[in-house]
Each structure stands twice: as C-alpha cells, then as structure tokens.
Amino acid sequence: MASSCYITFPTIFYAIRAESILKDQPYSFKMVPVPRSLSSSCGTALRCGCQDILSIKDLLLQNDLELEGFYRLEEEGLKSPTVTPLNLNERKVDEQ
Amino acid sequence: MRDRLSIIVAGAVVGLLAVVLVLQGNPANMGFCIACFVRDISGGLGLHRAGVVQYLRPEIMSLVLGAFVTAMYVREFKSTGGSSPILRFVLGMLMMAGALIFLGCPLRMVLRLAGGDWNALVAMPGYVLGVWLGALFLRRGYTLGRSQDQTPVSGFASPFIAVVLLILLFTAPAFIFFSEEGPGSMAAPITLAAGAGLLVGILAQRTRLCTMGAIRDLILFKDYHLFLGFAAIFVVALIGNLVTGQFVPGFAGQPVAHVDQTWNFLGMTVVGLAAVLAGGCPMRQLILSGEGQSDALITVFGMSGGAAFMHNFGLAGSPAGVSPAGQWIVILSLILLFVIGAGNIRMRSVAGIRQQAKAS
C-alpha cells in the first residue's frame, strides 16, 4: 500500500509559490492535481513524503503562504484511497 | 491509478457520445460544443436574433443537473461565490467571443480535429498559446480572490435555471425561438441529448474533466492527469468518426467552420487565456455552477451575454469567414484580457497568513 501526504492551497497562486520556494530545498515533492478523494476542486496540491510534511508546512508558512489542508492518502491499486486529514498541531504525523 | 483510469473513461465516454449525437441529428463535429449550445440557448431565449442558431439545447441543462445531483449525492455541493463577479462575467463574454470567432469551444476544437477538420489544427496552438499566457499571469500572482461561503439559495440557482429551461423546451411556448434551418435546427432527440448531457455531467463532476486544466497543468507542473481525459476524447471520437464514415479530412468545406486561419488561431488564444483567468473551460464552468459555485454561474451568464453581443452586432464568425468588425473584437478581447490579467496580480494576504501561522 503506497502512502503519500498532501498539502492543498486556497488558490493556484499559492501552489505556484510553494513550488518556487521548495525547488531549492532538499525535499522530494511534486505538484499534482488535487486528488479526487480530497476535493472536487480543480486546484493543485503538493505531494510529499509524510516524513517531510511538517518541515514543508513550517517553511511555507514562514514564507507567508496560505495553506488549506493537510492529508495522508493510502492507495492500493484501483481501490478507493484511504484519506486521513492531518492535524499538524500534533507533531507526530506517522501516528495519525 | 484509479483517478487516471476514471478520467480516461470520462474522456472516452464524451468522445463516444459526441459521435453518437451527431449520428442522431446534432450538427457535424458538434456532438458536444458548450459554447455553441449556450449560444443556441441565448438565441432560443431571444437574447439574439440569429435565426439559424436558436434552440434550447438539453445537453447543457442536463449537464448542469448531472453535476448537481452527483455533487449532492456525494456531499460535494457547496454554495460559494463572491470572487470578482463582474470580472468573471466579462471573462465569460470574452471566452464566448473567442469561441464564436473560431466557431467552437475547446471541446468542439477537439471534436473538429477528430472529424478531420484541419482548421482545428491551426486553432489548437492558438489555444495552447492562450493557456500559456494565462499560466504566465498565474506565475506572477494573478488571482480573482477566494470565493466565500454563501446561502444555499445562490448555489441552487444554476440547477433551478436548468430545470426552468427544460420546462420551456418541453412546453415550447411562443416566446421561445426554435431555428427552422441551419445548425440550430439540427438536433438529436431530446431524450437522447438530455441523457448524454446527464451522463457527461456526472462523469465530469466526478473526474474534473477540463480542457483548459489539461493544458495548464502540463505547462505549469508537467502533470498530464487532466490531459489524459482530453486525449481520450480525441482518440475515441476519431475512432468513432472513422468507423461511422464521419471523418472527412481537409481545410475547406468543413461543417460550421471557416478557413481564416489567423482568426482561428487568435480566436482560440482568446478562449485559452480567458479560460485560465476564469479558472476553467466553458464545460468546467457549467459543472462548477452545478456544484453550487455562483462565480461559475456568473461566468456562464457572461458566455450567454457574449453570444448575444457577438450575434446581435454581426461579429461572430461564419462559414464565410470573420468580418473586419469580428477581427477587431479579437484584438480588443486580447487587450482586455491582458488588462484583467495584469490588474489582478496581487500581493499575498498577510493577514490571512498570520492567522494561519498562529493557528498552527
């Protein structure tokens, strides 16, 4: 079962800024359409490893970005992915 | 994987239904054309008096209702609005202006290409250019601002209008115009057209099929997810046209098309740029309106107003080509789009960021 974490943004403007902020950072990430299981909006989300999401969130907020939500998605083949909204006030993502 | 399969299936179904609708009576290469159909509805309501393009196309109403019912069922219906409504109306008008110069929305551009209309090959790079220009504005900070939650009443406006239009279609009162010749008189049976629209509405709501997003995401993020749907529409419509003998390659003599290539190209540049600035192609605007987004409904109103403007003043393209006045409209549309794009490059909202930072 593959597991990834996602950050969503209120508008595509913030997604583009997030990409430019992160491109020189040592994080592995990709900008992707918001997964259908998270929202029906046609926006863009940031997909990253769950071990990095806290640091990425902090970095983006330090750069004055507006962020909308944080999620973990577990996908297995063609089954519906399991979505877990993350509360990043808790610092332990792996246990959520 | 599941998302990718879904969008390919949705695109394939749209392509297939487009071929079937033409076989059953819709104008050639116009199985689905959101701009043309909204234009026909404007004419049917008497907003313009171009006698050959007046009909209450049930595909549009059922598309909205398909999106609405699905959004309600999966609890994704959300009444929002209030994001630069006037500008969205203008963007809708300009999107329609560009489409009526080329004679088709992005969806019909793909269907025209799949039918062998090589004029669409000229329009396609124009559309990509428009989306690319829009992406430049997005990169520089263009935004129309966030939508706000609204009362359910405003969210229900779009499906309500769709139901009223369907009632008018079935009852056909004297004040509704129905073309007796030309593209407006050519239509698949109402039940088939409505069923096709309903199915596409459901699929498009579930998959977020968007012809603008397909190109935008490729340009901005090298992401081809939405493009898969775009490609599937083309491949299936192409196969369908080849099998049914509707593939007629060439430039001249194509149905509801002209060979003024400069204006085919620039018309779709206008559509691509307007679609990025408005946040979705004409089909996506209809779907979003069905999900309760009154901003999208206002864009659709703008499209309807744009159709009336283009036809009442004789500005729309025709098989004879694009009039000098129509050519000026393209230039003015591009200028207006650049003004709207540049005028909405905003600094980030510091207050919102601080609140978010405190909350976390």
Image (cartoon, coloured by chain):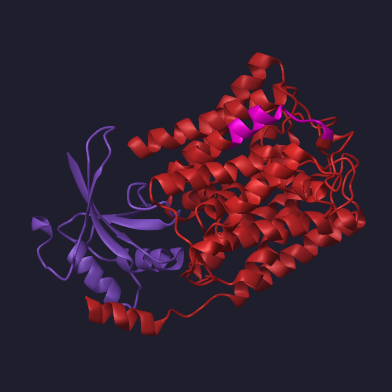
Chain colours: A purple, B red
| Quadrant the C terminus of chain B occupies | bottom left
Vertical order, B244 against B133 (above or below): above
Q: Is residue A86 magenta?
A: no
Q: Quadrant of the N terminus of chain B?
A: top left
The spot of residue B138 in percent (x, y) is: 51, 65
Q: Residue at the location (53% across, 70% down)?
A: B142
Quadrant in the rendering for residue B136: bottom right
Whether residue B195 is in magenta: the answer is yes
Q: Main secondary structure of the magenta part?
A: helix
Q: Is residue B209 visible?
A: no
* Residue B153 image point, x, y percent: 54, 63
Task: Name the residue rendered at 54%, 51% in the picture.
Answer: B290
Q: Position of residue B189 (x, y in %)?
A: 71, 27
Report the side of B46 relative to B112 (left or right).
right
Could you tell me how many numbered marks the image carries? 0
In terms of depth relative to the viewer, which is nearer, B253 or B308?
Answer: B308
Tell me where the magenta segment starts and ends, as one range.
B185-197
Q: Residue at x 83, y 55 (%)?
A: B47
Residue B130's x, y, as percent?
64, 56
Q: Is residue B174 visible?
A: yes
Q: Quadrant of residue B251?
A: top right
Q: Quadrant of residue A45?
A: bottom left
At a point 65% along the width and 38% down the height, the residue shown is B59
The residue lying toward the viewer, choosing from B195 and B90, is: B195
Question: B6 or A47, which is in the foreground?
Answer: B6
Give the vertical position of A81 relative to B86 (above or below): above
Q: In the displayed structure, would residue B308 be above or below residue B321? A: below
In the figure, is residue A64 to the left or right of B207?
left
